[in-house]
Image: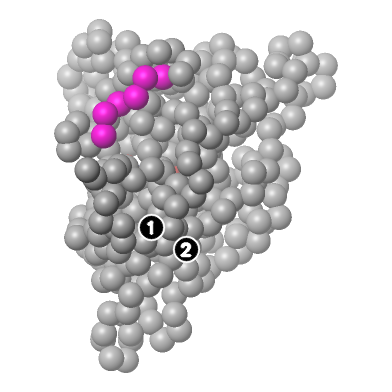
Amino acid sequence: MLKIVVQNSISKVVLLDVVQNVQTGVFVPLHLNRIKLPDDLIRPHEVPEGFESYYLKEAPPRPPSSLPPPGSITLETNLSTFLGSGRTGIVYSLENAILSDPAQFSPELVFKFARLHRCADLHREAWFYEEMECLQGVAIPRCYGLFEAEIPSGCELLLPENQTLVNNPDSKDAQVDQVVHPLITELRSTRNKLCILVEERLGGRLPIGSPFSPEVREDLNTLFAEIGPLGILNENDIRHANILQAPACPPGLPSLVSPFTFRTHGWRMIDFEMAAKTQDTPATLNHGHQEYLQLTLYNLERGYVCDLGGSD
Ligand SMILES: Nc1ncnc2c1ncn2[C@@H]1O[C@H](COP(=O)(O)OP(=O)(O)OP(=O)(O)O)[C@@H](O)[C@H]1O
């Protein structure tokens, strides 16, 4: 029987159809290797002096991983459809994806390519996916890792539907970290690396201009409470583009039960590159997240997309 690939099984991605030799016009397979992120890439925000009693004594520790030792599967694929883009990345579905181990299969996956000046942000986001492993498949998509390669000299990257990774390279970096890890500092000035985050493919966005049923409201209200027990703050990125439907199952994998609320959700949060790890209590975090969520839902019901978060 086929085994479902787990989130740390893929060690290499081979992209067949996006790197072209400029002189010959021949496509060159690009090999991207999985990155092992430093555990301390993100450090918890400091508590303001004199306000200690409002905060937890320390930031909630990362729950132990439930994954087996990392695997060594290669995923070879072409890109398919452009699914969306934002300040940090461009997202594609895959076509003809093949795993090197024929005994395993993956759900439908997407690649989020970091714009060439946004590798640091994609590293931050990947760290949050690892931090929230227990919520993957519950409240956030399953994440299959961060991969990187350098584009070989004499070659250029051709993304489908004329998307480009060079977009406003001088735009301001989000200053989220109080103590910036040296890797983030180095990546902030990097322009020659290709970084991709591999995620489970999710469904569509919330409808615009029609009322939400009490069930959907309840689902979303509790969805945004899931990240509080891990001390994760992400209110700047709560908006229409960052709430997607859970994958339809089948062919997608089933929604898992939350270890915190014991619920399953029909929706998922995405986009964590501007998140922070904090010593805030779950109640404080939930209060802030609810404010952004309720404003988003209020506007959507009235036919408006109110994007408070940052774009270039
Ligand atoms: N796992 C996924 N499955 C399906 N579509 C996705 C997935 N991840 C992202 N998308 C699509 O791509 C769009 C952009 O993704 P994302 O928000 O991660 O990019 P970003 O560059 O971080 O955006 P932002 O400007 O909000 O920071 C999403 O709004 C969504 O439409």
Identify the residue at the far right of this view.
50
Query: What color scheme is it?
Result: one colour
Precedes in sequence: disc 1 or disc 2: 2
In the orientation shown, which residue stands out farthest toward the bottom?
Answer: 23
> In the rendering, which numbered label is found on residue 202?
none
**How many labels sit on residues?**
2
Magenta stretch, main secondary structure, is: loop
Locate the N terminus and report the quarter of the image it occupies.
Answer: top left
| Residue 266 coordinates in the image, percent (x, y) | 27, 23
Task: Return the x and y of residue 163 as percentages of the image width and height.
Answer: 30, 62
Q: Label 2: which residue?
A: 33
Which amino acid lies under the numbered mark 2 shown in the image of this protein? Asn
Q: Is residue 53 visible?
A: yes
Which image quadrant for residue 5? top left
Q: Disc 1 designates what residue?
A: 73
Which secondary structure, mark 1?
A: strand
Identity of the residue drawn at 19% across and 31% down: 249
